[in-house]
Image (tube, grey):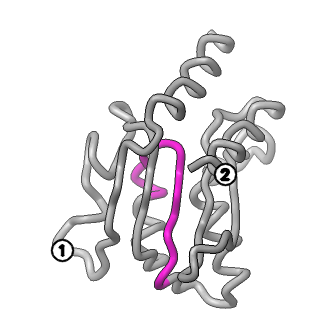
């Protein structure tokens, strides 16, 4: 989660919400990283998780990321939760819960829907206070 927090901080200089993600391979080594780049690129899909998954698929040479773990500072939204399922990651570990847009525990539970053909393991609340504080500080400065 420390590496994901470092990624989140990298989003701030270009005005993006500080959310960071790290994709770990089956051996636990970092495969890819990402932080929000929506403001930087003008791309509404440039969320930290999507960028880490895209880069991870490129590194793996395929879209299936079996055995991989996605670590992210904020509970993924519906798009990112869905992308994680479609990428076949084994696990998602997140920091702060997102009561406004969280799609793993707060508003929805996209990744564990029994109707889907893949359901990653989920662990939430890891370093939640630290992850949440980074977001609160960002929004306090931008309001």
Q: Position of residue 134 (x, y in %)?
A: 60, 27
**Up-down relation of residue 22 to residue 55 (above or below):** above
The answer to whether residue 41 is left or right of residue 48 is: right
Circle count: 2
The answer to whether residue 6 is left or right of residue 23 is: right
The tag on residue 3 is: 2
Q: Where is residue 18 in the image (x, y as percent from the top left)?
A: 65, 35
Asked whether disc 2 touches disc 1, contact meaning CB atoms under 8 Å apart, the reply is: no
Disc 1: which residue: 115
Magenta residues? Answer: 66-80
- Helix, strand or loop for disc 2: helix
Q: In which quarter of the image is the C terminus?
A: top right
**Up-down relation of residue 120 to residue 110 (above or below):** below
* Quadrant in which residue 31 is drawn: bottom right
Q: Please tell me which residue is depicted at 60% across the width and 67% down the height of the picture.
A: 23
Q: Please tell me which residue is depicted at 54% across the width and 24% down the height of the picture.
A: 133
């Amino acid at each position: 989660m420390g590496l994901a927090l470092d990624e989140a901080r990298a989003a701030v200089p270009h005005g993006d919400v500080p959310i960071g993600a790290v994709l770990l391979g089956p051996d636990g080594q970092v495969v890819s990283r990402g932080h929000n780049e929506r403001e930087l690129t003008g791309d509404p899909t440039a969320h930290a998780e999507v960028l880490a998954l895209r880069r991870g698929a490129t590194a793996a040479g395929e879209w299936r990321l079996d055995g991989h773990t996605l670590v992210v500072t904020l509970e993924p939204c519906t798009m990112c939760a869905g992308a994680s399922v479609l990428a076949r990651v084994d696990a998602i570990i997140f920091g702060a819960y997102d009561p406004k847009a969280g799609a793993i525990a707060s508003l929805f539970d996209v990744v564990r829907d029994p109707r889907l053909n893949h359901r990653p393991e989920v662990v939430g609340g890891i370093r939640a206070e630290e992850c949440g504080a980074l977001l609160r500080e960002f929004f306090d400065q931008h309001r």
